[in-house]
Image (cartoon, rainbow, N blue to C red):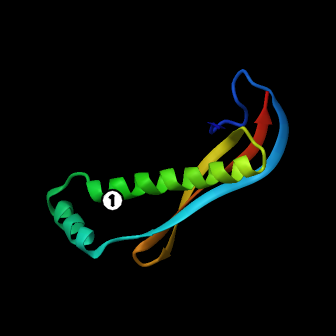
Amino acid sequence: MILVTSDEVPGRKIVKTLGLVRGNTIRARHVGKDLLAVLRGLVGGEITDYTKMIAESREQAIDRLVDEAKSLGANAVVGLRFTTASMMQGAAELLAYGTAVVIE
Protein backbone atom coordinates (compact mmCIF):
# COMPACT_ATOMS: atom_id res chain seq x y z
CA MET A 1 0.00 0.00 0.00
CA ILE A 2 1.39 3.37 -1.02
CA LEU A 3 0.54 6.25 1.34
CA VAL A 4 1.23 9.85 0.35
CA THR A 5 0.24 13.25 1.67
CA SER A 6 0.10 14.69 -1.85
CA ASP A 7 -2.98 14.49 -4.10
CA GLU A 8 -1.22 12.16 -6.51
CA VAL A 9 1.53 9.55 -6.49
CA PRO A 10 4.56 10.89 -8.38
CA GLY A 11 5.16 8.94 -11.57
CA ARG A 12 1.91 6.96 -11.26
CA LYS A 13 -1.55 7.52 -12.74
CA ILE A 14 -4.70 7.28 -10.62
CA VAL A 15 -7.11 5.09 -12.57
CA LYS A 16 -9.92 4.92 -10.01
CA THR A 17 -10.94 6.90 -6.94
CA LEU A 18 -12.66 4.77 -4.31
CA GLY A 19 -13.45 7.37 -1.68
CA LEU A 20 -12.67 8.45 1.86
CA VAL A 21 -10.93 6.03 4.19
CA ARG A 22 -10.04 6.55 7.81
CA GLY A 23 -8.56 4.90 10.83
CA ASN A 24 -8.66 6.09 14.39
CA THR A 25 -7.78 5.23 17.93
CA ILE A 26 -8.58 6.77 21.28
CA ARG A 27 -6.00 6.64 24.03
CA ALA A 28 -6.19 7.58 27.69
CA ARG A 29 -3.32 8.83 29.78
CA HIS A 30 -1.95 6.74 32.63
CA VAL A 31 -1.95 8.35 36.09
CA GLY A 32 1.54 7.07 36.93
CA LYS A 33 2.91 8.47 33.69
CA ASP A 34 1.18 11.78 34.42
CA LEU A 35 3.17 12.09 37.64
CA LEU A 36 6.41 11.46 35.75
CA ALA A 37 5.33 14.01 33.14
CA VAL A 38 4.79 16.64 35.85
CA LEU A 39 8.27 15.98 37.19
CA ARG A 40 9.71 16.15 33.66
CA GLY A 41 7.89 19.46 33.22
CA LEU A 42 9.74 20.87 36.21
CA VAL A 43 13.18 20.04 34.85
CA GLY A 44 12.42 20.19 31.12
CA GLY A 45 12.97 17.69 28.35
CA GLU A 46 11.02 15.18 26.32
CA ILE A 47 8.25 13.17 27.93
CA THR A 48 9.23 9.90 26.29
CA ASP A 49 6.25 7.87 27.54
CA TYR A 50 3.86 10.24 25.79
CA THR A 51 6.03 10.36 22.67
CA LYS A 52 5.87 6.56 22.53
CA MET A 53 2.10 6.53 23.14
CA ILE A 54 1.44 9.01 20.31
CA ALA A 55 3.74 7.10 17.92
CA GLU A 56 1.90 3.85 18.70
CA SER A 57 -1.45 5.60 18.23
CA ARG A 58 -0.38 6.98 14.87
CA GLU A 59 0.72 3.52 13.67
CA GLN A 60 -2.52 1.93 14.84
CA ALA A 61 -4.59 4.60 13.04
CA ILE A 62 -2.56 4.06 9.84
CA ASP A 63 -3.02 0.28 10.10
CA ARG A 64 -6.78 0.73 10.38
CA LEU A 65 -6.83 3.16 7.45
CA VAL A 66 -4.85 0.69 5.31
CA ASP A 67 -7.22 -2.15 6.23
CA GLU A 68 -10.21 -0.06 5.15
CA ALA A 69 -8.49 0.97 1.90
CA LYS A 70 -7.62 -2.66 1.08
CA SER A 71 -11.21 -3.72 1.73
CA LEU A 72 -12.26 -1.28 -1.01
CA GLY A 73 -9.66 -2.68 -3.42
CA ALA A 74 -7.24 0.26 -3.21
CA ASN A 75 -3.50 -0.02 -3.67
CA ALA A 76 -2.77 3.56 -2.53
CA VAL A 77 -4.09 6.36 -0.34
CA VAL A 78 -3.56 9.97 -1.38
CA GLY A 79 -4.06 13.13 0.64
CA LEU A 80 -3.18 11.37 3.90
CA ARG A 81 -3.74 13.59 6.92
CA PHE A 82 -3.78 13.27 10.70
CA THR A 83 -5.87 15.10 13.24
CA THR A 84 -6.36 14.86 16.97
CA ALA A 85 -9.25 15.74 19.23
CA SER A 86 -9.76 15.72 22.96
CA MET A 87 -12.51 13.23 23.84
CA MET A 88 -12.61 13.85 27.59
CA GLN A 89 -10.15 14.87 30.25
CA GLY A 90 -7.18 12.57 29.90
CA ALA A 91 -8.20 10.93 26.59
CA ALA A 92 -7.65 11.91 22.99
CA GLU A 93 -8.49 10.59 19.54
CA LEU A 94 -5.94 10.35 16.75
CA LEU A 95 -7.54 10.10 13.29
CA ALA A 96 -5.81 9.31 10.00
CA TYR A 97 -7.79 9.95 6.81
CA GLY A 98 -7.28 10.15 3.09
CA THR A 99 -8.65 9.09 -0.30
CA ALA A 100 -8.38 5.46 -1.38
CA VAL A 101 -7.34 5.07 -5.01
CA VAL A 102 -6.19 2.51 -7.52
CA ILE A 103 -2.99 3.46 -9.32
CA GLU A 104 -1.29 1.88 -12.32
Return the x and y of residue 79 as percentages of the image width and height.
68, 43
Report the residue at 31% width, 72% height from top: 30
Q: Name the quadrant of the N terminus.
A: top right
Q: Is residue 84 left or right of residue 15?
A: left
Return the x and y of residue 23 as percentages of the image width and height.
61, 57
Report the residue at 78% width, 50% height from top: 72
Q: Is residue 104 above or below residue 22?
A: above
Q: Name the quadrant of the C terminus.
A: top right
Report the residue at 49% width, 50% height from top: 59
**Residue in the foreground of this view, choosing between 35 and 59:** 59
Q: Secondary structure at mark 1?
A: helix
Report the residue at 79% width, 37% height from top: 102
Q: Residue furthest right?
A: 16
Q: Is residue 58 left or right of residue 43?
A: right
Return the x and y of residue 4 as percentages of the image width and height.
63, 37
Residue indicated by mark 1: 50
Q: Is residue 19 above or below residue 87?
A: above
Instruction: Please state which amino acid type lies under the numbered disc 1.
Output: Tyr
Give the tally of numbered discs. 1
Question: Within 10 Å of the Cα at label 1, are there few (<14), some (14-19), or many (20+) other Cα atoms?
Answer: some
Write down the quadrant of residue 77 in the picture: top right
Return the x and y of residue 40 as percentages of the image width and height.
19, 60
Q: Residue furthest bottom?
A: 88
Write down the quadrant of residue 13 in the picture: top right
